[in-house]
Image: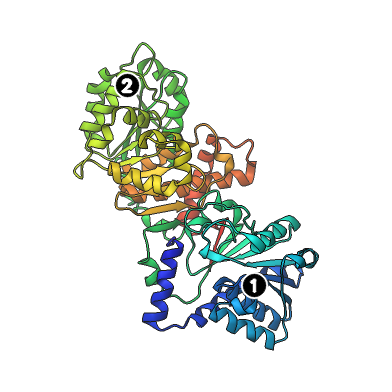
Amino acid sequence: MKLLTAAQMRAVDTKVIKEIGIPSMVLMENAGRQVAETAVSYLRRRGHRKVSIVVGKGNNGGDGFVAARYLHNLGLRARVFMTSSYKELSQDALANYHICCQLGIDIQEIDEAYLPKLRFALSLTDLIIDGLLGTGLKGPPKDLVGDVIELINDIERPVLAVDVPSGLDADTGKVFSPCIKADLTVTLAAPKVGLFVYPGAEQTGRVHVANICIPQELLNSAGNGNLITAKNLSKLLPSRPEAGHKGTFGRVLILAGARGMTGAAALSSQGALLAGSGLVFVGVPQSLNDIMETKTTEAMTIALAETAERCLSVEALPKIEEYLPRMDALVIGPGLGQHPSTGELVRTLLEQVNCPIVLDADGLNVAAQTGILESRTSESPPLVLTPHPGEMARLLGCSVEAVQQERIKSAVTAAQKFLATVVLKGAGTVVAASNGGFWVNTTGNMGMATGGSGDVLTGIIGGRLAGGMAPVDAAVFSVYAHGLAGDLAYEQLGALSLLAGDVLKKMPQALQLIEREEVTERWIYLE
């Protein structure tokens, strides 16, 4: 599903109005009707009927007037509060204001002096509809609008936001002060980037994507952003022929583990196996091989030359080269350590390997230290990078704060700079391609912020690459499936006690739900 910025959505609106001939009033009518229908569904499930619509002077407010009309006609008690004079309303909003007046809907223009009465009125309502600002925000809400937002948040009544919560930057997810804290957001035509990028995602509640009759082909061509949902993910999975054997479904070699970090290697190997890889080999320092054999049953271990500190040594290269011709994918990094000899091994492999590579954890840190990724060309083998924000900061030579403030930009920059597929982990994981395309994930939860969770994801991506998926498809599919498994574990165990091993245990169920197209999205409702 496409993920658009405010400017991209405005460009689509303009094309629809000028080239296709759908009047702006029709778009407003469709938007307001969808808002009203969502409000009715919410209220009737709870046996409620009182709605307060707080509107500004722009088209977002016009959507609110339309919603008020539909709610009124359905027999609900709808009341509108305006933060501007009717003389300041946009043309379409003004037309709908006059219709509401003709229908006898209670409309109140408010000012600073009216705020105590507004507080009382809103405290008695069953649902507040936020039609104040929409996507046109240019900075922190000020004056009366800012005061109204603070009042709405203070009284803690359920809030439905129109398009985006007022005070939220639709493009970046930046949360201005003040900003509406919504329980529901009805976003129009296509989801906006800021609704799914943190910290903005914390303000939206459950997001409903409303069809306002804009042709899908226009939305699809509007930008490079995408939202990862379960829809169509099953189509990315290659068929598994009945006559297939373990070699048919891909071989992956995982180079991982150092003293105290064998768990990372074990978790990554299990992730690759559960993702469907036919054969998984784990190369570890030779003194840790016996430990790995007790940790893994289905994966095969390879004892490799090590340093005195029990990290992989560059002297392991000849033995690794014996296995590489048979491998369909190579994973480097989980729990690997940063010994100079290990770094030399990683650098050499990145220069010589021809199969798809997943580079994670200490593999990324070594790459950042040596600058080896900057020498990649269009002829280099496919590469998937899986950094957390700290690793991304080292790769880009910036601060963690800079990465987190512009997560999408950071991921896309790294993908283009290193000619790779980038998976920037964290809340709202971002997948970016070197052509500028990006995908924001909708699964996962705070319980997955635990050691080993990233190692599981790395293994899943490696398994999907070995199984024949293209790098971007493997990354998109894997981050969604990994997050879905985490959500299933969260539902059973909660956040505090959720472990990476619990995510592994839920992977089969997550993959079955995706294959059967039986996933119920947790945070987004697609009409």
Q: Which residue is mark 2?
A: 342
Image quadrant occupied by the N terminus: bottom left
Placement of 122 over or under 421, stated as above or below: below
Q: Nearer the viewer, residue 526 or 330?
A: 526
Q: How many marks?
A: 2
Residue shown at the point (75%, 64%) measured from the top left = 115
Q: Give coordinates of residue 21: x percent, y percent.
A: 41, 84
In terms of image quadrants, where is residue 376?
top left
Q: Nearer the viewer, residue 523 or 503?
A: 523
Q: Which residue is painted at 69% across and 62% down in the image?
A: 148
Within 10 angstroms of label 2, few (less than 14), some, or many (20 or more) residues?
A: many
Vertical position of residue 492 compared to residue 301: above or below: below
Image height check: is 505 above or below 234? above
The amino acid type found where label 2 is placed reads Thr
Q: Amino acid at mark 1?
A: Ser
**Residue 374: image location, x then y, percent:** 26, 36
Dividing the picture into quadrants, the one containing residue 157 is bottom right
Query: Position of 522 compared to 261: left or right?
Result: right
- Image point (42%, 43%), residue name: 424
Residue 90 position by quadrant: bottom right
Residue 430 numbered tag = none
Q: Which residue is mark 1?
A: 84
User: Is residue 231 toward the left or the right of residue 345 in the image?
Assistant: right
